[in-house]
Amino acid sequence: MRNIVILTGAGISAESGIETFRADTGLWAQHRVEDVATPEGFEHDPAKVVAFYNGRRADAAQAEPNAAHKALARLEREFAGDVLLVTQNVDDLHERGGSRNLIHMHGALNSALCGACDHRWPAPLQMHVAESCPRCAAPRARPDIVWFGEMPYEMDRIFAELSQADLFVAIGTSGNVYPAAGFVAEAARAGAATLEINLEPSAVGSQFAKALMGPATQTVPAWVDSVLTDA
Ligand code: BJW
């Protein structure tokens, strides 16, 4: 086995104290998706959207990487082949846990994006509405987040890596949001072994050949140990 592609979702950060989206008391039980996670919502009420992401950025800054984040970083360091981590999460707990080969397909809380020229720069802890772009000066700064209806980042690279994967693993994601929910089918079609690690089977759980159920801080370190021992 040479190439491992790992997809992570909100469940891997849950035990660091970051809320998931679709739990009964999760973010989507507290906020309307249309209001805070669509371009139309931002157009209609930018102050509400900026405040939502300011709160999320503050929560992420308080959180610490957990044993699952650290185990994936160890896998990247110690596995003889290539490990690519694709996260849907916008927090920076994978980086702070030590991962380097990482794609934030849904953007990042610590990044700001110019809606006029696509320039990116480090977001302040608290963004303000209609901040100016440091490159083109347009008052169009927005959180650098992929909202519904927008194209996730680095899709060409992700699909290329999935087509070369020997193993695809999804950790802590509910399988409700595409294109990420379609990665298991893509990887299986290309001949990869597939593994789901979650608290409970996801919406696409039946498409995985194997599953490990339990909290990520227990299942992920145990799985990483087994991969490094068998390698
Ligand atoms: C634990 C745990 C513990 C808990 N240990 N596990 C109809 C059909 C198909 C698709 C569409 C459709 N209509 C529209 C679409 C497309 C749309 C979409 O998928 N909609 C669905 C709702 C149907 N997708 C898009 O618009 C995307 N763009 C797009 O498709 O562009 C076109 C394109 C075409 C072709 C190729 C490529 C692209 C953009 C999606 C943007 C998603 N944005 C959000 C919000 C922004 C980021 C943010 O604010 O953080 O991203 S939505 C939200 O969901 C967030 C997440 O990244 C994403 C996934 O959530 P996740 O991570 O799975 O969290 P939860 O809460 O759902 O699940 C947590 C899991 O953890 C659970 O399974 C728990 O069991 C588990 N768990 N504790 C282990 N301790």
Image: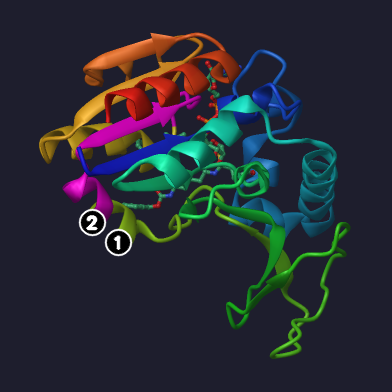
Label 2 secondary element: helix
At a point 57% along the width and 27% down the height, the residue shown is: 68
Res 223 seen here: yes
> What element does badge 1 sit on?
helix
Q: Is residue 119 magenta?
A: no
Amino acid type indicated by mark 2: Ala
Q: Quadrant of the C terminus?
A: top left
Residue 160, image quadrant: bottom left
CB under 8 Å between callouts 2 and 1?
yes
Q: In the rendering, at what x and y percent does residue 218 appear?
A: 56, 14
Q: Nearer the viewer, residue 86 or 43?
A: 86
* Residue 215 in the figure: left or right of residue 139: left
The answer to whether 173 is drawn above or below residue 103 in the figure is: above
When asked about the image quadrant of residue 230, the answer is top left
Query: Is 193 situated left or right of 83 in this image?
Result: left
Q: Is residue 201 left or right of residue 19?
A: left
Q: Which mark is residue 104?
A: none
In front: label 2 or label 1 = 2
* Picture quarter with the N terminus: top left
Three-letter amino acid code at disc 1? Answer: Asp
Return the residue at label 2.
Answer: 160
- In the displayed structure, would residue 179 be above or below residue 135? above
Bounds of the magenta segment: 160-176
Q: Residue at x 77, y 48 (%)?
A: 53
Q: Residue under circle 1? A: 156
Give the Cα distance between marks 2 and 1.
6 Å
Out of 162 and 174, give the one closest to the viewer. Answer: 162
Residue at figure coordinates x 48%, y 35% from the top left: 8
Viewed as shown, does residue 108 lie left or right of 224? right
Would residue 203 be visible to someone looking at this image? no
User: Where's residue 90, x and y in %?
Assistant: 63, 47
